[in-house]
Image (cartoon, helix red, strand yellow):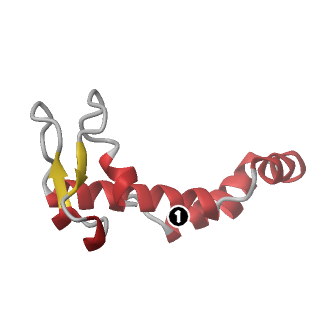
């Protein structure tokens, strides 16, 4: 998830970061700046982006498929869909 989060920083730069020691793993403390014109995000900024991405992924995977949602709306209506399918997921994974 770290690399996915890092892709949100320095979007105008190609390959702006790398790893100091490949054997040490892909962790923030092993991150190095490869492009002098890029800015290094703080660990807190990166962790916040990771939390946001995890929240998005959790919600995305908890919702039923679009096909199932549309079928539910057709048979039960929009209000039932909101109450039965959407609200429980939003409550389980509240926006950070």
Q: Quadrant of the N terminus?
A: bottom left
**Residue found at x 63% / y 57%:** 86
**Residue at position x 23%, y 46% from top?**
17
Residue nearest the viewer, comparing 8 with 79: 8
Residue 21 coordinates in the image, percent (x, y)? 22, 65
Question: Is residue 96 in sight in this rendering?
Answer: no
**Image side of residue 49 versus residue 30, left or right:** right
In the image, taking residue 2 as reference, residue 90 lies left or right, namely right
Mark 1 Cα-neighbour bin, 10 Å: few <14, some 14–19, many ≥20: some
Task: Report the residue that reaches farthest toward the right.
Answer: 75
Q: Residue at x 59, y 56 (%)?
A: 60
Name the residue furthest left: 36
Instruction: Say whether residue 76 is left or right of residue 61.
Output: right
Image quadrant holding the C terminus, namely bottom left
Residue 60 shown left or right of residue 22 in the figure: right
The residue lying at 25 percent from left, 72 percent from top is: 24
As drawn, 35 above or below 52: above
SS at mark 1 in the image: helix
Q: Is residue 85 above or below residue 40?
A: below
Residue 19 in the image: x percent, y percent? 24, 57
Q: Is residue 6 or residue 50 the one in the foreground? A: 6
Q: Quadrant of residue 34?
A: top left
**In which image quadrant can residue 30 be found?**
bottom left
Residue that carries the numbered disc 1 in the rendered image = 58
Q: Nearer the viewer, residue 95 or 52?
A: 52
């Amino acid at each position: 998830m770290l690399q996915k989060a890092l892709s949100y920083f320095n979007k105008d730069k190609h390959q702006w970061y790398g790893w100091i020691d490949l054997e040490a793993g892909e962790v923030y403390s092993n991150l190095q700046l490869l492009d002098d014109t890029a800015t290094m995000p703080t660990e807190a900024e990166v962790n916040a982006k990771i939390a946001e991405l995890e929240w998005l992924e959790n919600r995305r995977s908890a919702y039923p498929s679009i096909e199932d949602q549309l079928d539910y709306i057709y048979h039960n209506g929009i209000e039932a869909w909101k109450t039965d399918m959407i609200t429980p997921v939003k409550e389980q994974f509240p926006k950070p």
